[in-house]
Amino acid sequence: MAATTPQTAPETNAGEPSDLQEQARRHLWMHFTPMGAYRESEVPILERGEGCYVFDVHGNRYLDGLSALFCVNAGHGRTELGEAAARQAAELGFYTNWTYAHPRSIELATRIAALAPGDLNRVFFTSGGSEAVESAWKLCRAFHKLNGEGQRTKIVARELAYHGTTLGALAATGITALRQPFEPLTPGAVHAPNTNSYRWPADRDPLWAADQIEHRIEFEGPETVAAVILEPVQNAGGCLPPQEGYFQRVREICDRHGVLLISDEVVCSWGRLGTWFGCQRYEYQPDLITTAKGLTSAYAPMGAVIASDRVAEPFMAEGKMFVHGLTFGGHPMAAAVAQANIDILEREGLNEHVQEKEPELRGMLEGLRELPIVGDVRGAGFFCAVELVKDQETKGTFSDEESERLLRGFLSGELYRQGLICRADDRGDPVIQLAPPLIADTEQFEEIDAVLRRVLIDAWDQIVSG
């Protein structure tokens, strides 16, 4: 069935599509969205999902090649997740984890600790990824202060890395265009180069980017640095994987300078890379993990900081506490959904499925290199990117104006019209990112390949060579 084949949508209580358009334009303020673009054009309104697909209010079907936002790992239409929430609502709809505990947060924390590597045994729940990063940085600062090193306040992140939008998480984010509208930001975040080796000199040491983190720590003064925060595969910039040995070198650097290592796995955990946590795929042991998104397959908002026993220990002493909290952290209904979601991931062997099918997905994308507009293909698991170029041989990229025409003027809309939801982005150089649900298989890969090929050929003919 073609991606754009109209389907008969079931009856809903949402109102007619024309009513929803009017209401959306008048009242809904969408995130990271230039709202003025919808004065004349339709707001894309998706009303239901099934497996790897979502359907709009007109009944058109789209392959969700982005898992909504790297998060619907188990796929759409999992009614058992809603049923788990309903059962919990009947028992205890909400109670806070401030002073009090409830069974679901206890059980979920225990389960997460069992799945996390090493001594990562303490789970602090949040409502999402930005809050997890914010909480982790605060925890690192407080840890050092309790240990008599209160001057350790800084965090080292990477250029182009996205760590969230709250002011602390945004300070760690290394994307200038997202930071500038809200400056001055929380002080103390500094940045080092990322692992995008596509345009590195051929003779550069493969561990150069890791060593640049040490250079930054030494430049700032190790006694002032609280933590280094890194994604196993960096999202922004287009699914940037580490070089072999990168994280082992970073771990050595952090240990040498008394700096905590945060593995930001808001995207890379819960099977996205074929393991429970991305640090397990790359075999490094962080001091803290931040997670969200796939924890519940986004059926309920939930995140967490998973801390090592060593980091937690000072806060467990008599009279001490982590002076931080979030009303909805550990929400019982979200915790019930997370448990049911992990049940699905385990029962259906989705980690193993990603490991088995990763070569097929990657091979399909590698085949796109025959198109002149494709420069690089990279990523891991079900988390991949295709970098677009003007010249394959020189790796020549696009000007800002050309990138705007290519991505937002053509690719984003055309991919959607052809029935594929993915991300066409230029935080860095222009890329197309793909992160299908973990249940995706050969049928979906072939569909992705067909749409990408058609649209990229048209993009080259109309935008680049034309």
Image (tube, grey):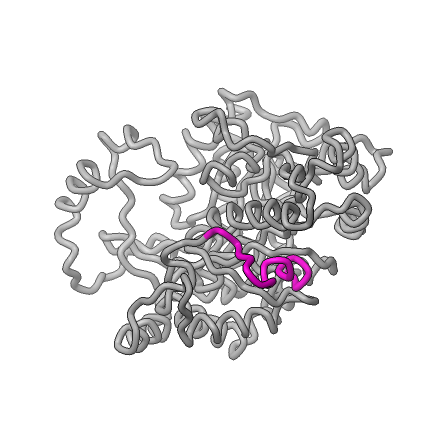
Q: Quadrant of the N terminus?
A: bottom left
Answer with left or right where residue 186 lies relative to residue 11: right
**Horizontal side of residue 174 vs 423, given as left or right:** right
Is 451 magenta? The answer is: no
175 or 62: nearer the viewer:
175
Q: Position of residue 148 (x, y in %)?
A: 69, 46
Query: Who's the residue at 56% across and 30% down the image?
Result: 187
Q: Quadrant of residue 358?
A: bottom right
Which residue is depicted at the point 49% across and 51% down?
323
Number of numbered markers? 0
User: Residue 442: image x %, image y %?
Assistant: 54, 64
In the rendered structure, the answer to whether residue 381 lies left or right of residue 24 reads right
Residue 321 in magenta stretch: yes
Q: Nearer the viewer, residue 102 or 174?
A: 102
Picture layout, residue 367 above or below residue 94: above
Q: Horizontal placement of 7 versus 334: left or right?
A: left
> Quadrant of residue 381 in the image?
bottom right
Residue 209 percent across, percent down from the top left: 76, 38
Q: Which residues are magenta?
A: 308-324
Front residue of 107 and 279: 107
Can residue 154 be seen here? The reply is: yes
Q: Residue at x 72, y 57 (%)?
A: 282
Residue 40: % across, % down:
22, 30
Nearer-the-camera pick, 184 or 392: 184
